[in-house]
Every structure is written in C-alpha cells, then in structure tokens.
Amino acid sequence: MFSYLQPADKPVVEGLERFELRMGASQAEYNPLRCIPGNTPNGERLSRWTLTPEQRQAIADGADIFLELCTFNNPMNPIRMAVADEINSAFVTHGYKLDELEKAKIG
C-alpha cells in the first residue's frame, strides 16, 4: 500500500483560525494547505494532516510514514513531524509568537 496523506479539512488549531494562511489555493497542481505561520526568525509553518481508516490501520500494523519534499534544488530545510489528537492553542500561540503578531496589528 502506498497512499498519500491529505491535509485535514478542519482548523490547524481550534481557536487560532484567524492566523491561518491557505497555501497553494490558487495553484491547481497543489492541494490547498491550511497552515499557521510562525512570527519567528525560523519562519515555521504548522499544518494538520489526516489519515484514512486504511492508513491508520496500516500504521497500527507497522507501516512507516514517508516524507517527500520539493526542495526546488535548494538545501533541504529542517522539518519535524508529530502525532496528536489536538494541540494546545496556548502552546502554539506562545511558541509561534502569535500574541506578539496580534499586538502589532492592534497597535
């Protein structure tokens, strides 16, 4: 079995929808990807992905997850992958410095 994971059709982090960008929305060759951009020097982008029941079963049975990145022949950027049911919005707000971004918009 080889099947691609798809972006989740729900907020990246509940309650932080106002920070989301939709990457690739105007590019037919890409699936639109909701992400939260970090307000940090690292320029993080947090996205949320989902698995089909068959993919979940394959992982439970020992299948691995493969990551393919288009680098466009530039050096590969560091990445991290995680598994969670939900993510704490305060953790993302603090780590991505979203509170500072929001203060800047108000001020």
Image (cartoon, rainbow, N blue to C red):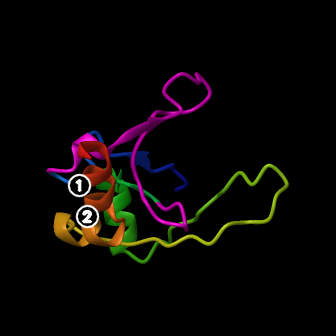
Q: Residue flagged by tag 1: what amino acid is it?
A: Val
x and y, in percent, of residue 60 in the image: 33, 73
Question: Is the Cβ of the residue at disc 2 closer than 8 Å to that at disc 1?
Answer: no
Residue that numbered label 2 is attached to: 93
The quadrant where residue 84 appears: bottom left
Q: Is residue 73 left or right of residue 88?
A: right
In front of the other: 97 or 90? 97
The quadrant where residue 6 appears: top left
Q: Is residue 79 left or right of residue 71?
A: left
Q: Is residue 21 left or right of residue 67?
A: left
Q: Marks 2 and 1, Cα distance to the nearest angstrom?
A: 10 Å
Residue that numbered label 1 is attached to: 13
In front of the other: 46 or 5? 46
Q: Which residues are magenta?
A: 15-44
x and y, in percent, of residue 103 in the image: 25, 53
Kindly state the secondary structure of the residue where label 2 is placed. helix
Q: Which comes before the other along the chain, label 2 or label 1?
A: 1
Q: Is residue 70 above or below residue 67?
A: above
Q: Is residue 24 above or below residue 85?
A: above
Query: Does 10 lie within the magenta span?
Result: no
Q: Residue furthest front?
A: 107
